Image (spheres, rainbow, N blue to C red):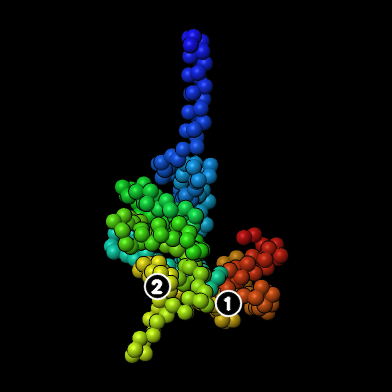
Amino acid sequence: MSAADLTNLLGRAEQLLSRLEVLLPHPLQEPEWSASIAWRYRKRGGAWGGAVLDPIRHVSRISYADLKEVDTQKERFARNLAQFVAGRPANHVLLTGARGTGKSSLVKAGLDAHAPDGLRLIEVDKADMVDLPDLIERVAARPERFIVFCDDLSFEDGEPGYKALKSILDGTVSAAGDNVLIISTSNRRHLLPEYHSDNKTYKHTDDGELHPGEVVEEKISLSERFGLWISFYPFSQSEYLAIVSQWLSHFGLSADAIEAARPEALVWALERGSRSGRVAYQFARDLVGRQGAKA
């Protein structure tokens, strides 16, 4: 082989290695921690691409005071989060229940309240739960306190992220560090689909007791590893109107204007088929927008 042929072969080999390097997985890089108080964990280039922590430049701001008619849930959540931020023992949190009742907003309010104390948030999609050990390892040595947050979490049978989350919460040598608190919201109390056929696995004992079978036990085993369960319930009409009033007041409407808007707010909820906090907020934005005021 001539020198020219060897040079050409080496050049082509270097090009091939460069292309292969793009396809290989890359370790999670250190982000610019001062860029934000919240980040989103993302994978670039599909399953074989590198993972990054993207700073969320415009963090949704909401305070505990903005959340109405969920005082019990708010008190339990705020107490547990304050313990965590202070470095005291605290439990991982599962927020479950009716849609639009303030589950995600409560997490945002907690971040807003404690960000000056060093609390930070990393949002992780359900599909990326398999990477939780790597993510926790990356932040383990940081001085900040981190919420690892997965919104609207639920799993189908056999999804890989289910076992990864279960192991991190409790059950293996690898576990969440002292500066990491896992918080998830879900409309499913046990995070997995429940079927009528699951009832067939229940067993009756001779003394008449009823015990769940292996299928049911497996579905319960993930949710029970969250130390703190907080449940949210559909709002009554009076609770819904109170939330409407709060948001209209937030947007600057007078007491008379708020009282006049009550019938329209009820029609709005009837058309949407829901009296949730989200619906109340959407009505307030619509009404204020139609009246020409600025949010």
Q: Which residue is mark 2?
A: 214
Residue 238 higher or lower than 120, as above or below: below
Residue furthest bottom as drawn: 207
Q: Which residue is mark 1?
A: 240
Residue at 47 percent of width and 53 percent of height: 128
Query: Residue 113 occupies which quadrant of the picture?
Result: bottom left
Residue 43 seen anywhere in this rendered image of the structure:
yes
Residue 260 seen anywhere in this rendered image of the structure:
no
Q: Nearer the viewer, mark 1 or mark 2?
A: 2
Residue at 48 percent of width and 14 percent of height: 6
How many numbered markers are drawn?
2
Q: Nearer the viewer, residue 204 or 191?
A: 204
Image quadrant occupied by the C terminus: bottom right
Query: Residue 252 occupies which quadrant of the picture?
Result: bottom right
* Mark 1: amino acid: Tyr
* Mark 2: amino acid: Glu
Residue 253 higher or lower than 205, as above or below: above
Residue at 45 percent of width and 57 percent of height: 161
Q: Nearer the viewer, residue 170 or 71?
A: 170
Residue at 38 percent of width and 48 percent of height: 134
Instruction: Return the x and y of residue 253 as percentages of the image width and height.
Output: 62, 69
